[in-house]
Image (tube, rainbow, N blue to C red):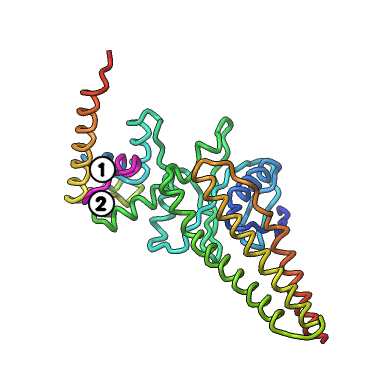
Amino acid sequence: MKDIITSHKFYAVWEYEREENDLNEASKNGLQLVKGGCFHSTFCRDDSVRYIYQLDYCPKITDKDRYIECFQDAGWEYMNSTFNGWHYFRRPYESGLSLEDVKIYTDRDSLYAMENRWCGSLRALSILTLLCSLLCIGMVLYQHGPVNAEKLTLIAEAAAMLILSATFSIALKNIKHIRQGEKAGSTPPAQIVFPLVLLILVFCLVLNIIF
Amino acid sequence: MFKKYEPLTESYFYILLCLYNHPNHGYGIMQQTAELSQGNVKIGSGTMYGATGNMMKKGWIRETLSDNPDDKRKRLYELTDSGRKVLEQEIQRLKHLVEISEKIVKED
């Protein structure tokens, strides 16, 4: 009986390579992914094997058999898919194998096409959150009178939405920089931004219920 | 104005080339591409899935089943007439490029 370890570490969509690296590193240290998920991944402890992982984003697959076969042809083992279209693959690690040798996207066009599949939603989200933020600010300005709890929550909500919008925009901008061969800055880590935003929104909700 | 035939990407070109003489499965295409390019060009599975899907949509290749009982992989890809034409036109285009460059760039 191998012990199962659950991880709730999550990654933003633009951090998929970081997730791959973390999985490779975990496998090296004897923690093998059993099932990958967005907010819930399971691992088991096994020091006798080591794998290399790759993630693919492909929410609309017309022929899943053909899809999985394509990966098996290149030596990948299909693990599982998440509800939102990410697929996890692994292959046994061979010494001397560099990460560049096992990339599942080997030309620029197909890599960009994969990224573009989620960049569109990311752009829409960054605009939507910006509009939400502006709406909150507008409501604050519209209300006359002293600063009260309602105004405070609106300001907090505006800030939360603005943080999200800015993070998404920075992520998109960095992707653009990388594509143009320029130096990309760092995007605020989702592991800090998302809980922070959630915390603010929960705080606002509680405040609204109390007052 | 859009040209009728866009230049093919290297991956598309190799896939079509590997299907020119006979149908082939995904594994065979990846192996042959590595051989032909002496290891310089690799076709990863994500690229392969996207490229074959696109080319099937364009009608350049189609799926067919292997009738060889020894073949573990039943799914084969096969060049269509229009795919054959696309590849031949691309080869002509490349030949022309080489010819005109040779006139200008003289290697001694």
Report the Cα–Cα distance between label 2 and label 1.
9 Å
Q: Is residue A136 left or right of residue B90?
A: right
Measuring from the top left, give residue B58's x and y in whole percent: 26, 56
Q: Is label 1 in a helix, a strand or a loop?
A: loop
Which residue appears at 68% of the width and 54% of the height?
A188
Q: Do labels 2 and 1 share a chain?
A: yes
Which residue appears at 61% of the width and 69% of the height?
A130
Could you tell me the amino acid type at mark 2? Answer: Ile
Main secondary-structure element of the magenta-colored stretch: loop
Which residue is under mark 1?
Answer: B19
Q: Is label 2 in a helix, a strand or a loop?
A: strand
Q: Is residue B62 above or below residue A209?
A: above
Q: Is residue A82 left or right of residue B87?
A: right
Q: Earlier in the sequence, mark 2 or mark 1?
A: 1
User: B108 or A41: which is nearer to us?
Assistant: B108
Is residue A75 one of those drawn in magenta?
no
User: A90 or A112: which is nearer to us?
Assistant: A112
**The residue marked by circle 1 belongs to what chain?**
B
Q: Is residue B8 left or right of residue A113?
A: left
Which residue appears at 37% of the width and 40% of the height?
B30
Task: Identify the magenta region.
Answer: B2-14
Question: Mark 2–mark 1 contact, CB under 8 Å?
Answer: yes
Is residue B8 one of those drawn in magenta?
yes
Measuring from the top left, give residue A176's x and y in whole percent: 52, 50
Measuring from the top left, give residue A174's x and y in whole percent: 57, 50
Could you tell me the amino acid type at mark 1? Answer: Leu
Which residue appears at 46% of the width and 48% of the height?
A111
Q: In this view, does A137 lie above or below B61?
A: below
Q: What's the mark number on residue B61?
A: 2
**The residue marked by circle 2 belongs to what chain?**
B
Q: Can you say which quadrant of the picture contains the C terminus of chain B?
A: top left
Q: In which quarter of the image is residue B70?
A: top left
